[in-house]
Image (cartoon, grey):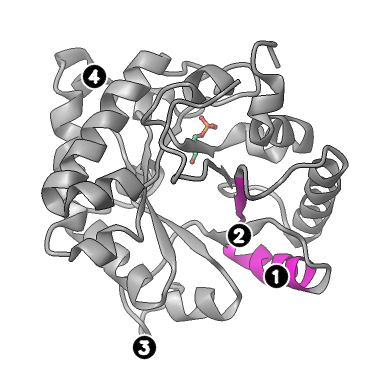
Amino acid sequence: MSDARATTRTPLMAGNWKMNLDHLQATHLVQKLDWTLRDARHDPADVEVVVLPPFTDLRSVQTLVQGDQLFLRYGGQDLSPHDEGAYTGDISGAFLAKLGCTYVAVGHSERREGHQESDELVGAKVRAALRHDLVPILCVGEPLEVRRSGDHVEHVVTQLRAALDGLDAGQVSRVVVAYEPVWAIGTGEVATPDDAQEVCAAIRAAVAELADDATAAAVRVLYGGSVKPGNVAELMQRPDVDGALVGGASLSVEDFASICRYRAHAGSAG
Ligand SMILES: O=C[C@H](O)COP(=O)(O)O
């Protein structure tokens, strides 16, 4: 199967573990994931594999990845907009960078809704990530009532603009965007490939307006929301879908490895 996307964008599969797996379970999963992918001769140059464990697992994951030279990358699920100081409970971008993180999720809907994170705060977190050379995975997506009203593209583009406005093209080019319709997260109700393509293409067009065409062509746009081994290949056939932000299925080595190897499984269910 050949992907329709520009070959300059390496597909990215990121597993967001959310508040699951302690550091012992994390060690086990990461080792097994690496073995499984190596066994299948997975080439990270073809599809980049990332895990986003809870903060308390990161040191253990770092020790494994760096000590045993595993090919997967890792990152945080959130970060503070501040760099240091009296911010009890916050984790700075500097701390994540020191632990070898490459990525950090920003503005996940579970943070926007559960912790009342505003567009302004999400934008400040994107900037904090960039200050510490972390790649922000900026999450945007509409709730069900907005999808039903038909204003989903406008909603998502507004979130994107609020987070990225004022950044220069070089900064925008370092961002990964994840389109996650809230109604598809953890519900088993995946967006259709056409739904995902519509919004991912609109995100890319908005990036072109915020930065320039070259930046828009280079920025990776992921889809997230009930991605499974059985639906990932079809989503990945759409030209503006460059990967997936995977929640529940990333907690299973077999399922996540299968998602990462979607090209090998194209045409089969699961
Ligand atoms: O960050 C991941 C998303 O919230 C998707 O979660 P899910 O794959 O369990 O629907």
- Specify whether residue 32 is in view: yes
- The residue located at (57%, 21%) in the rendering is 233
Q: Residue at x 84, y 47 (%)?
A: 32
- Name which residue type carries label 2: Tyr
Is there a contact, CB below 8 Å, between mark 1 and mark 2?
yes
First reached walking from the N terminus: tag 4 or tag 2:
2
Q: In the figure, 195 relative to 159: above or below?
A: above
The residue at which mark 1 appears reads as 62
- The disc, 2 or 3, on the residue closer to the chain's N-terminal end is 2
Q: Is the residue indicated by label 3 positioned so its CB lies within 8 Å of ligand 1?
A: no
Of callouts 1 and 3, the N-terminal one: 1
- Labels 2 and 3 touching (C-beta < 8 A): no
CA gap, disc 1 and disc 4:
39 Å
Magenta extent: 48-66
Q: Secondary structure at mark 3?
A: loop
Residue lying farthest bottom? 85
In primary-sequence order, the first of circles 4 and 3 is: 3
- Is 131 on the left or on the right of 100, as rendered? left
The picture places residue 74, in percent across and down from the top left corner, at 60, 60
When the figure is inspected, residue 228 is found, relative to residue 73, above or below; the finding is above
Amino acid tagged 3: Gly
Q: CA distance from mark 1 to mark 3?
A: 25 Å
Q: How many marks?
A: 4
Q: Which residue is mark 3?
A: 85
Q: CA distance from mark 4 to mark 2?
A: 32 Å
Identify the residue under disc 2: 74
Nearest-to-viewer mark from 4 and 2: 2
Q: Which of label 2 and label 3 is nearer to you? A: 2
The secondary structure type at the circle numbered 2 is strand
Q: Nearer the viewer, mark 1 or mark 3?
A: 1
Q: How would you rate the neighbour count of disc 1 (Cα within 10 Å): few for under 14, some for 14-19, many for 20 or more?
A: many
